[in-house]
Image (cartoon, rainbow, N blue to C red):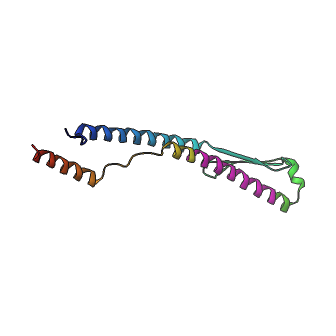
């Protein structure tokens, strides 16, 4: 009695690989959508400057309290720059968490059959035929 895998086993294996691959691709598409929806928000210590950045690092909103106009231009410039960077950093961190989580959920996809797999199966069939 042969313990070699049957063609039906190979078909089932390929179907499992395809199903897993589809599931992983769907999860990665979901992650891409989640990253697009990321919103990193930061504000200055005195709450005079607030910035929002998206998952791609684009600044989507800047709010400057009118009281900030009392600051000299150099101080206000430094504050705006620092808050912009903080908002982008927060958005990048959130996006990275989403991507890392999605990649962790998609680990373990078995290697697809290669030319050696096919050659081994053909050789196996030839051996089985010669044993008859």
Which SS does the magenta portion mostly show? Answer: helix
Name the residue furthest front: 1
* Nearest the eye: 104 or 72: 104
In magenta segment, residue 87: yes
Query: Start and end of the magenta stretch?
Result: 78-99
In magenta segment, residue 111: no
Q: Residue at x 75, y 48 (%)?
A: 42
Residue 120 place in picture, x, y as percent: 23, 51
* Nearest the eye: 3 or 129: 3
Residue 129 place in picture, x, y as percent: 11, 45
Vertical comparison of 21 with 83: above or below: above
Q: Residue at x 57, y 47 (%)?
A: 100
Residue 119 place in picture, x, y as percent: 22, 53
Name the residue furthest bottom: 74
Quadrant including the C terminus = top left
Q: Is residue 4 left or right of residue 55?
A: left
Q: Quadrant of residue 101?
A: top right
Residue 29 place in picture, x, y as percent: 49, 42
Q: Is residue 81 left or right of residue 100?
A: right
Q: Residue at x 86, y 49 (%)?
A: 46
Q: Residue at x 20, y 40 (%)?
A: 2
Quadrant including the N terminus = top left
């Amino acid at each position: 009695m042969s313990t070699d895998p049957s063609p039906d086993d190979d078909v089932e294996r390929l179907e499992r690989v395809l199903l897993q691959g589809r599931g992983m691709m769907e999860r990665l598409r979901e992650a891409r959508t989640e990253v697009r929806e990321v919103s990193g928000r930061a504000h200055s210590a005195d709450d005079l400057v607030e910035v929002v950045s998206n998952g791609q690092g684009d600044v989507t909103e800047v709010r400057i309290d009118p009281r900030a106009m009392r600051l000299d231009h150099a101080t206000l410039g430094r504050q705006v720059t620092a808050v912009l960077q903080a908002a982008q950093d927060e958005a990048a961190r959130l996006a990275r968490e989403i991507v890392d989580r999605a990649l962790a959920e998609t680990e373990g996809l078995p290697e697809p059959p290669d030319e050696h797999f096919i050659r081994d199966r053909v050789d196996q069939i030839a051996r089985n035929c010669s044993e008859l």
